[in-house]
Amino acid sequence: MRLSSDWSLTLRNLFLPIYCKQCGERILTDENGYFCATCWERSPRIERPFCPLCGRPHVGAVGMGTRSNFRCGPCSATPWDRPYRRILGAAVYDGAVEEAVKLLKFHDKPRLAGPLAELMGNIAREELDCAAYELLVPVPLHRVRRRERGFNQSQLLASELLPVFPNALLDESLERIRPTRVQSRLGNEAERRANVQGAFAVRSNGEVRGKTVLLVDDVITTGGTIAECALALRAAGASAVDVLAAALAMPHTARAQSG
Ligand SMILES: [Zn+2]
Ligand SMILES: [Zn+2]
């Protein structure tokens, strides 16, 4: 098996060379079919210390000796009143990870769900009580968009992540019941909130009542979409909702194509 996959890789490299989408270097290993190891490693991961509520990293404090998380300014200024308990992100929406998310969802590269889910699984194992989650729920696409794209990127991520959560099932009873516009193309907070307000619901046969849910998303910008998803899950009886995302858009990278 190993031999044949080495052979197929050798043959592919010979006849169909592949190049890193970030730097253009030729890729000679099969670990990640789109980015070289250097670009992938260099893409900024979220590491301690970060805010235990919104997940934003304290960039200036990384490497300063403290590994203890603490709340960021905005999260300490107001009481936490969101329908989810916390957000955990694996990487900053920048560099190769940003490119990977865009290729995954806008350029039909579902294979990139693997490397992205690997980053998510790594941080989840370190930071979450993985055995506590009973359902992994992907942020849904509206059925029309899902049909156009052929897949839901968050569903692919959630499927890849299942082995990390020993007691969790994949649950797709959360639905986007009306089409929404791309959040990043809307001007302000109020417009974004109105865009996604009431856009999600759990199907009546949903199994979420009383369950501890991990909501899975590809990239989070303002958090409007996940807040609406969490509200719908709580309304259907979920006992708690946490959020795991591949990437968090920081204010300076707020070009994210999601919500
Ligand atoms: Zn590269
Ligand atoms: Zn925060």
Image (cartoon, helix red, strand yellow):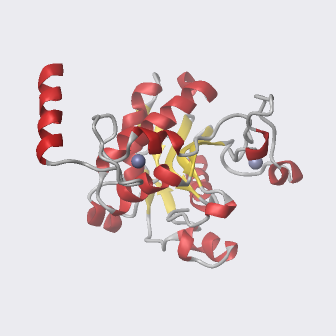
Residue 239 vs residue 21, the one in the foreground: 21
Residue drawn at x 17%, y 27% as measured from the top left: 6
Count of numbered marks: 0
Give how far across and how far down residue 162 sits, in percent: 41, 31
User: At x 67% / y 42%, what residue is drawn?
Assistant: 86
From the image, which quarter does the N terminus lie in?
top left
Viewport quadrant of the C terminus: bottom right
Image: 157 above or below 142: above
Using the rendered view, name the quadrant where residue 179 is placed.
bottom left
Residue 155 appears in the figure: yes
Position of residue 218 measured from the top left corner of the image (x, y, whole percent)? 48, 51
79 sits left or right of 112 in the view: right
Seen from the viewer's position, the closer of residues 25 and 85 is 25
Q: For this view, does 20 lie left or right of residue 208?
A: left
Left/right of residue 191 with respect to residue 151 in the rendered view: right
Residue at the (11%, 37%) spot, across then down = 11
Rendering quarter of residue 241:
top right
Residue 51 at x, y = what percent? 74, 42
**Which x, y percent locates residue 240?**
63, 38
- Examine the rendering and report whether any part of residue 237 can be seen: no
Residue nearest the observer in this picture, 130 or 110: 110
